[in-house]
Image (cartoon, rainbow, N blue to C red):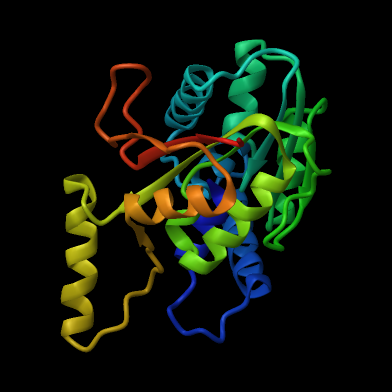
Amino acid sequence: MSIGSLLRKISLNRSATPYDSAAAYQAHLDAMLRLHPDDRDLAFAEGVGSKTVELFRLQGDGHVAVLRHNGLADGMAIYDLGCGCGRTAQALVRSGWTGTYTGTDIVPGFVDELKRKCPGFAAHVHGAPRLLAADASLDIVYHWSVFTHLSPEECFLLLEDTVRALKLGGRTVFSFLEIGEPLHRDAFLTRVRLIGAGKTPALLDTFLHRDWIRSWAVELGLTEPVFTNGDDDRDHPAFWQSLVTMQKR
């Protein structure tokens, strides 16, 4: 989720670079650590947008519930794109899951904290639109609120490389904002009103369409996408963002 959180901070000024965003969010994390010198867990929770440690853990447990529903099992090799300080990784440890975990994020401070909290998990600072994984080596690639803050072209590149890294039958699960979702419509219209008033939105929010994801699936050799609405809590806690899962053919 944290790549998405980082890119939310980037102005629509296209001169901004991934290095700029990483430095800005590292500075934000440093500020949270100064604000909470006696509560490191709260500092990192606020660093990724969770107002409390309890919410941080609850959200992480929800992430694991989504993964379990989508086939997560012990012994799998999984990849956490935009791992942040380990909201999902820490929840995986709490759940007792065992397997091969790789996480990547563009903020060194987050990656260091994940390693500290989850010493058995591999995590790397990495921002290129390519996974740090060998061909056909992963069972699940997941990410939360990453495609929400990248251009469609960048989303496609990451999805394309996800297919490369997945085993046959391997699965990708991710969240996204969609233009046809009532839960997300207000966020879209707020941006429309700001731009109509001649103002530049401070945050980059990308809204995808399910038909685009279906088209990408056909192009890249993935199965028909299975979508979950953001308010659907039948199989796991409601995510608010829409979810999609696809498998490599």
Q: Is residue 32 visible?
A: no
Give the image location of residue 223, x and y in percent. Answer: 50, 36
Direction from residue 58 to residue 137 in the image, left or right: right
Along the line of sight, the residue nearer the viewer: 19 or 43: 19
Direction from residue 3 to residue 145 in the image, left or right: left
Give the image location of residue 248, x and y in percent. Answer: 61, 36
Q: How many marks?
A: 0
Image-quadrant location for residue 236: top left
Image-quadrant location for residue 207: bottom left
Give the image location of residue 11, x and y in percent. Answer: 45, 77
Residue at x 50%, y 55% (from the top left corner): 4
Image-quadrant location for residue 190: bottom left
Residue at x 60%, y 19% (from the top left corner): 72
Residue at x 50%, y 43% (from the top left corner): 144
Q: Is residue 246 visible?
A: yes
Residue at x 76%, y 19% (from the top left corner): 99
> Is 231 placed above or below 27 here?
above
> Is 213 placed above or below 28 here?
above
> Is 220 placed above or below 202 here?
above
Along the line of sight, the residue nearer the viewer: 164 or 33: 164
Quadrant (top left, top right, bottom left, bottom right) of the C terminus? top right
